[in-house]
Image (cartoon, rainbow, N blue to C red):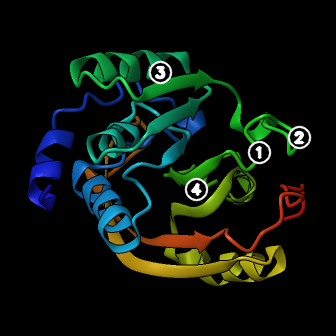
């Protein structure tokens, strides 16, 4: 499948109806989602035929995209029932029979949880922790590493790049910045003063193949 074709499909995925600021519900645009997934599949072979997890899946754009690209199964995790209801509708619309949804607080998936090291690939656009949840981006990232056998793909503010690189070294994983993107954040909440804000965001890949099954998230940031 060509990149433009994938992006065209993802433009049909319904987004948040009433985004929740406390959950930092900002949609992954079809353009960014398509480029992420296309790179994962064509450059690294990390989607087709793989078990894919999507942490904080929201309305499911990354999950739907991975299904379109032929994942063996994609499982989306999110705490918000409203977002999961939209994701479920999207799943029906795209006739995705290899897509499942799990409602849970991602922060409460423990290292001993049944999902530990169960996925080939984890993809996510986690909260950046810019409002009330400082450090939640690292919690998502370390949990993703604990759940993935092969690789983790994620978006993080470029301003945090050096800090995240240091944490990756501590965790014993290899991190590569695949691209620096401009995240065009549309005004979604009343406190937004401008119609759009450009945020520099890193698209990263973490190689989890060298981590042991004993490796799991901790509370150290």
Separation of marks 2 and 3 at Cα, in angstroms:
25 Å
Q: Are marks 4 and 3 in contact (CB under 8 Å)?
A: no
Separation of marks 2 and 4 at Cα, in angstroms:
25 Å
Mark 2 or 4: in front is 2
Residue 180: x, y in percent? 38, 78
Separation of marks 1 and 3 at Cα, in angstroms:
22 Å
- Tell me if mark 4 has few (under 14), some (14-19) or many (20+) residues whose alpha carbon lies within 10 angstroms of its own: some
Label disc, if present, on residue 38 of the rendered structure? none
Q: Which residue is mark 2?
A: 112
Residue 17 in the figure: left or right of residue 140: left
Residue 75 in the figure: left or right of residue 7: right
Whichever of labels 1 and 3 marks the residue nearer the N terminus, that label is 3
Whichever of labels 2 and 4 marks the residue nearer the N terminus, that label is 2
Residue 189: x, y in percent? 41, 36
Figure check: 130 above or below 112 = below
Whichever of labels 1 and 4 marks the residue nearer the N terminus, that label is 1
Whichever of labels 2 and 3 marks the residue nearer the N terminus, that label is 3
Residue at point 67% right, 75% down? 164
Q: Quadrant of residue 91?
A: top left
Q: Which residue is mark 4?
A: 128
Residue at point 73% right, 38% down? 115
Whether residue 134 is visible: no
């Amino acid at each position: 499948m060509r990149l433009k074709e994938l992006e065209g499909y993802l433009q049909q995925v319904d987004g948040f109806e009433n985004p929740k600021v406390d959950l930092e519900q900002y949609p992954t645009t079809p353009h960014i989602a398509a480029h992420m997934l296309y790179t994962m599949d064509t450059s690294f072979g990390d989607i087709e035929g793989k078990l894919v997890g999507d942490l904080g899946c929201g309305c499911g754009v990354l999950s739907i995209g991975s299904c379109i690209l032929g994942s063996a199964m994609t499982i989306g995790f999110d705490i918000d029932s409203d977002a999961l209801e939209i994701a479920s509708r999207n799943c029906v619309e795209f006739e995705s029979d290899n897509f499942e949804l799990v409602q849970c607080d991602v922060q409460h998936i423990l290292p001993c949880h049944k999902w530990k090291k169960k996925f080939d690939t984890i993809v996510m656009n986690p909260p950046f922790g810019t409002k009330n949840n400082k450090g939640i981006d690292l919690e998502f990232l370390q949990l993703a590493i604990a759940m993935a056998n092969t690789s983790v793909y994620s978006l993080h503010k470029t301003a945090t790049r050096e800090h995240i690189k240091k944490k990756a070294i501590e965790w014993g994983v290899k991190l590569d910045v695949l691209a620096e993107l401009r995240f065009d954040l549309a005004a979604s909440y009343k406190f937004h003063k401008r119609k759009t804000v450009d945020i520099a965001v890193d698209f990263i890949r973490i190689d989890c193949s060298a981590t042991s099954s004993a490796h799991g998230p901790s509370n150290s940031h």
